[in-house]
Amino acid sequence: MKRFLCLALLIGVGGCQFKTLPDPNDPKTTGVMQPMVLRNNLKGAADQFFGRVKTREITDARARKLLSDYANKLLEEVPIEKIPQAEAWEYAEIFITAERWKDARDCLLLAVKKPATEDRRVNDNLRLARVLANLGEVKEAIVTARSVFDAKPADKAPILTAVFLELVPAAQGKGSDAELAKLLLEAIPQSEQTIVDTSTDAGKLYLSARPFHIRGAFTKAVELYTSARQTDKAVEAANASDEWERRNSART
């Protein structure tokens, strides 16, 4: 589930499988690698690589390495300095897949200057937070993630999953575990406040997955406080988790 959610955030959904991956150095394709083309090619590559994981031909780690390498080849044809502001977030997703964190940061810093929609503001700042964490800029990552907590309930859906599944794994063990635990605990009510369209598959999926993410976030917060040797805070987080479970059981 975690791998699916992270991959969906990075390269989107849709597209088709490629039995033979498009060659980014083919003269027929050079010069036409627009964001949608890049993302469709990556989606096809991901389908193929992770399909081989399912059949146990390769490991998950090997599939991720193959996808990262392929993304880097695609990006050889992208002149970074010419990326337009309106498309910066799309290119950033490819740089993230390629694990080119500095280039991803530059694209996202450009994207968040003038987001086209509130959805883009929320998602691009959360992606920027993850990228900053991978660059070791954890305190800046935490501030960036928290900057979107003022979003309206209809726009809060990405917050907890981005913090829990992306930012924290990238930032853990880099000297700010207690601050990460606090951020996680603050992200939980963000998820509880989220309003989704329950008539859609995406809305139904979000609501069904939310309890699992909240439980995981509480568990991780306890772990982070413990690793930071803040035992009292770890106990408080564990008690908050128990209280949440009681409330959740009463509602169901």
Image: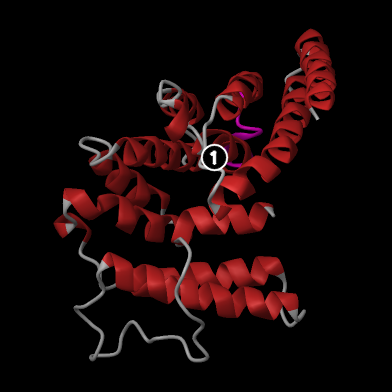
Q: Quadrant of residue 57?
A: bottom right
The question of residue 128 being in magenta is answered with no
Span of residues in magenta: 169-176
In the picture shown, does residue 208 fall above or below 181?
Answer: below
The front one of 99 and 248 is 248
Position of residue 186 in the picture relative to residue 99 (left or right)? right
Q: Foreground residue, 207 or 35?
A: 207
Q: Quadrant of residue 162?
A: top right
Tell me if I can see residue 99 in this picture: no
Q: Residue at x 31, y 68 (%)?
A: 36
Residue shown at 26% from the left, 85% from the top: 29
Q: Between residues 5 and 156, which one lies in front from this camera angle?
A: 156
Q: Does 174 lie within the magenta span? A: yes
Q: Residue at x 58, y 80 (%)?
A: 48
What residue does disc 1 label?
Answer: 162
Q: Position of residue 206 (x, y in %)?
A: 61, 44
- State the quadrant of the N terminus: bottom right
Front-lying residue, 6 or 141 = 6
Residue 46 lies, in percent from the top left, at 54, 72
Residue beneath the point at 61% across and 26% down:
192
Dot 1 amino acid type: Ala
- Look at the magenta stretch and give its main secondary structure: loop
For label 1, the crowd category at 10 Å Cα-Cα, with few meaning under 14, some 14 to 19 and many 20 or more, is: many
* Percent position of residue 203, x then y: 56, 46
Q: Identify the element where label 1 is drawn.
A: helix
Residue placed farthest to the top in the image? Answer: 232
> Would residue 162 be seen by someone viewing this image from the given angle?
yes
